[in-house]
């Protein structure tokens, strides 16, 4: 429950349509795409950086948790108010402040949707490369808070490569400005990258200066169908060793393909057991060379067919439909976005096959193979206690395998609450202690998104 004095002060500062306290109104802010539910005691909707500062200062004084939130599309529980407090919804800070074509920069508030940035940049001949599957609905602030990626990260990188600077309010209520307006700048520590991926635990982002990229003059799609998993992963390793880098390289296993077949019956050959969806972009001459090189790299013993796709839009539609399709058949699936070095993909996927068989768990895998970023989905019945226990043991071994292969436990979804118990597998105690000290410096009373990221 909120202290009465804090409630009174917030009512004076925010009108009723920007300060919810009725549990019915607050319920929509009790969950994210992890599907776990933790109702907040209240919800605040700031419109300005000054609003954010007032909220942080008051919550800091009263020691009340404040949980920054975009549109709630995250899958790792990063925006869940686990210990109550106030959900700080940034969705109404949705102004694009400026577009600077000469310097390839767009400045936007955190509530601006990823798609809105793309729409604003396109008439000027630019785009913002981070393209998570939730781009139509996720906010720039959320993309920055989780370090979002997407299919095109293989060529263009993730969010951290495309943010020049930030304005934010720390947990102590201080206004800070990080980075600079130019693509070169080495004055001081790189606090911009420190905030990217920090999941709202250090500061609340109020403005972002984003680096835009020129739209390619041409794009081509390639599909490659394989009889087995090993031939497919061998092709991935060969493709990524080429000088012609694809702009996207997506992998789908047999389980993923069956899901697509059920929804789009005529899209895929029946004998395909693994598939690559590849995109190349650049000048027309560059594309011709890249397509030829990639098609040659796909020539493994298990290749059924590889060729240019006539309709790349429908392919991406099918790929982006995978996560919603999985939600339909397994609402309580365990979804992990681990990353391993590309040349370790064959060993990792073979290990996944063995682990899912040993623990008798249905398993569907797909993802951004060009980065070694695989979305591992264990399909479980949450009412079956034996199956849940097997899934927990299986997941633990999957993470051990990832670390053994020099990988990381999260590529783009973040840690939130879903992965915090496993963080010490990847980060040693001394480094974790340093991170905790940084957290205390930014947020001395631990009011910003408390409990996230760090193992308990």
Image: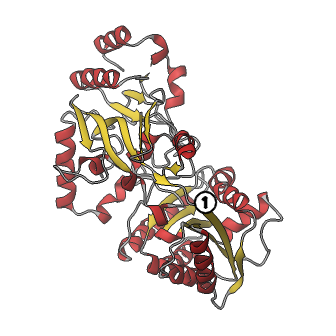
| Residue at 50% over, 48% down | 75
- What residue does disc 1 label? 379
Q: Which colour scheme appears in the figure?
A: secondary structure
User: Can residue 76 be seen in the rendering of this structure?
Assistant: yes
Image quadrant where residue 217 sits:
bottom right
Above or below, 257 against 31 in this view is below
User: Can residue 79 be seen in the rendering of this structure?
Assistant: no
Q: How many marks?
A: 1
Residue placed farthest to the right in the image?
266
Residue placed farthest to the front in the image?
102
Q: Quadrant of the N terminus?
A: top left
Q: Give 64 or 57, whichever is nearer the viewer.
A: 57
Q: Give 379 or 235, whichever is nearer the viewer.
A: 235
Above or below, 149 against 3 in this view is below
Image position, residue 398 (x, y; %): 45, 69
Q: Give 432 or 114, whichever is nearer the viewer.
A: 114
Image quadrant where residue 145 sits:
top left
Task: Estimate how packed mark 1 is, as few (under 14), some (14 to 19) or many (20 or more) residues with alpha carbons within 10 Å.
Answer: many
Image position, residue 380 (x, y; %): 60, 58
| Residue at 68% over, 85% down | 303
| Residue at 41% over, 71% down | 402
Residue placed farthest to the bottom in the image?
301
Disc 1 element: loop
* Residue 427 located left or right of residue 82: left
Image position, residue 281 (x, y; %): 57, 66
Image position, residue 387 (x, y; %): 57, 61
Above or below, 355 against 267 in this view is below
């Amino acid at each position: 429950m909120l202290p009465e004095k804090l409630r009174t002060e917030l009512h004076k500062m925010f009108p009723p349509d920007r300060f919810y306290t009725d549990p019915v109104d607050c319920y929509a802010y009790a969950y994210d795409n992890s599907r776990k539910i933790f109702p907040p005691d209240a919800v605040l909707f700031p419109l300005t950086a000054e609003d954010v500062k007032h909220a942080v200062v008051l919550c800091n004084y009263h020691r009340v948790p404040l949980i920054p939130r975009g549109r709630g599309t995250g899958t790792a529980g990063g925006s869940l108010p686990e210990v109550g407090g106030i959900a700080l919804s940034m969705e109404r800070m949705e102004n694009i402040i400026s577009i600077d074509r000469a310097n390839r920069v767009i400045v936007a508030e955190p509530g601006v949707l990823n798609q809105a940035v793309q729409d604003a940049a396109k008439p000027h001949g630019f785009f913002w490369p981070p393209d998570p599957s939730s781009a139509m609905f996720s906010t720039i602030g959320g993309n920055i808070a989780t370090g979002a990626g997407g299919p095109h990260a293989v060529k263009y990188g993730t969010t951290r490569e495309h943010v020049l600077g930030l304005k934010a309010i720390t947990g102590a209520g201080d206004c800070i400005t990080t980075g600079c307006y130019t693509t070169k700048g080495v004055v001081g520590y790189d606090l911009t990258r420190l905030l990217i991926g920090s999941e709202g635990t250090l500061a609340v982002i109020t403005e972002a200066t984003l680096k835009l990229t020129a739209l390619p003059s041409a794009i081509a799609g390639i599909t490659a169908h394989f009889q087995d998993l090993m031939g497919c992963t061998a092709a991935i390793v060969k493709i990524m060793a080429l000088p012609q880098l694809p702009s996207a390289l997506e992998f789908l296993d047999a389980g993923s393909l069956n899901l697509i077949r059920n929804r789009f019956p005529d899209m895929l050959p029946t004998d395909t057991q693994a598939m690559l969806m590849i995109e190349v972009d650049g000048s027309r001459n560059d594309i011709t060379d890249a397509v030829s090189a990639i098609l040659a790299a796909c020539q493994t013993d298990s290749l059924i067919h590889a060729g240019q796709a006539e309709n790349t839009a429908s392919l991406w539609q099918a790929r982006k439909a995978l996560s919603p399709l999985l939600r339909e058949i397994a609402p309580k699936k365990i979804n992990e976005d681990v990353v391993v070095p590309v040349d370790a993909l064959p060993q990792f996927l073979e290990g996944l096959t063995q682990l899912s068989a040993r623990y008798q768990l249905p398993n569907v895998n797909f993802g951004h193979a060009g980065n070694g970023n695989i979305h591992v989905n264990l399909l479980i019945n949450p009412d079956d206690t034996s199956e849940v226990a097997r899934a927990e043991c299986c997941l633990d071994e999957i993470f051990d395998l990832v670390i053994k292969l020099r990988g990381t436990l999260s590529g783009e979804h973040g840690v939130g609450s879903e992965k915090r118990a496993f963080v010490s597998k990847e980060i040693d105690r001394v480094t974790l202690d340093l991170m905790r000290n940084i957290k205390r410096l930014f947020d001395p009373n631990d009011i910003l998104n408390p409990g996230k990221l760090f193992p308990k």
